[in-house]
Image: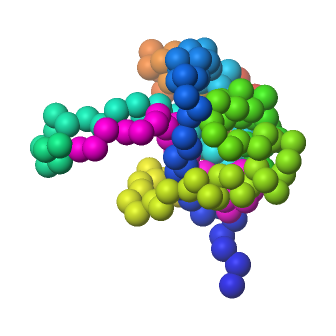
């Protein structure tokens, strides 16, 4: 039985950061643009992705252990939500976000680099965390989401302008705005 290629999949990996590289990694992560210039924008299947540096255990929340053990090292937590199989997602990270992938995980212990495909996949599968609770706001591909956003963006200026149109002018304005003949 094959899996639906558009199914929403969640992935988390926890990788140890090399000693004394936390500040450099944090500074680099702070330079990564969001939105249209994000490296994740180049990934056709990724809905959401995030990096978090874990450098301490918080204790000020309800239910926290009273005396947690201190962390022996600092970690990079990566989480993502995407359409398809994990192998396809890792390939997109490796090939389409390659320079950023190397620049980020290059600060982590054991990272083999993107040029070694099999080692790259093994590294992320080895550092994978089980995902026991996840949430997907919708069951659509990233292409469908981007198309819907483009349609919405095309309709907003028309809707604003059309508010003042008389009923008899609305259809003509719609045809003119959207180029429908």
Above or below residue 62? Residue 18 is above
Please give left or right for residue 66 compared with residue 50 in the image. Answer: left
Q: Which quadrant would residue 110 be assigned to in this image?
A: top right
Residue at position x 68%, y 52% in the image: 123
Q: Is residue 159 visible?
A: yes
Q: Which quadrant would residue 21 be assigned to in this image?
A: top right
Quadrant the C terminus occupies: top right
Quadrant the N terminus occupies: bottom right
Residue 55 lies within the magenta run: no
Q: Position of residue 166 (x, y in %)?
A: 47, 20
Q: Residue reaching furthest right?
A: 115
Above or below residue 121? Residue 172 is above
Residue at position x 42%, y 57% in the image: 134
Q: Position of residue 128 (x, y in %)?
A: 56, 56
Above or below residue 31? Residue 79 is below
Residue at position x 41%, y 54% in the image: 135
Foreground of the two, 146 or 34: 34
Foreground of the two, 120 or 1: 120
Q: Which residues are magenta?
A: 68-90
Q: Is residue 151 visible?
A: no
Q: Position of residue 79 (x, y in %)?
A: 52, 45
Give the color scheme: rainbow, by chain, secondary structure or one colour. Answer: rainbow
Q: Residue reaching furthest bottom?
A: 1
Residue at position x 58%, y 53% in the image: 127
Number of on-image labels = 0
Foreground of the two, 148 or 135: 135
Q: Which quadrant would residue 149 be assigned to in this image?
A: top right
Q: Position of residue 5 (x, y in %)?
A: 69, 65
């Amino acid at each position: 039985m094959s899996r639906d290629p558009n199914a929403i999949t969640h992935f988390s990996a926890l990788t140890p950061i090399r000693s004394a590289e936390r500040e450099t990694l944090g500074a680099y992560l702070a330079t990564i643009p969001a939105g249209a210039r994000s490296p994740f924008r180049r990934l056709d299947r990724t809905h959401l992705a995030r990096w978090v540096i874990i450098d301490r255990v918080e204790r000020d929340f309800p239910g926290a252990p009273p005396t947690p053990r201190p962390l022996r090292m600092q970690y990079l937590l990566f989480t993502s939500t995407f359409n398809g199989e994990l192998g396809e997602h890792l390939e997109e990270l490796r090939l389409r976000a390659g320079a950023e992938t190397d620049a980020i995980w290059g600060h982590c212990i054991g990272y083999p680099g993107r040029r070694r495909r099999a080692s790259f996949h093994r590294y992320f599968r080895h550092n994978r965390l089980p995902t026991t609770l996840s949430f997907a706001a919708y069951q659509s591909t990233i292409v469908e989401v981007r198309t819907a956003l483009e349609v919405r963006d095309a309709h907003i200026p028309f809707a604003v302008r059309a508010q003042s149109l008389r009923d008899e002018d609305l259809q003509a304005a719609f045809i003119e705005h959207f180029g429908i003949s």
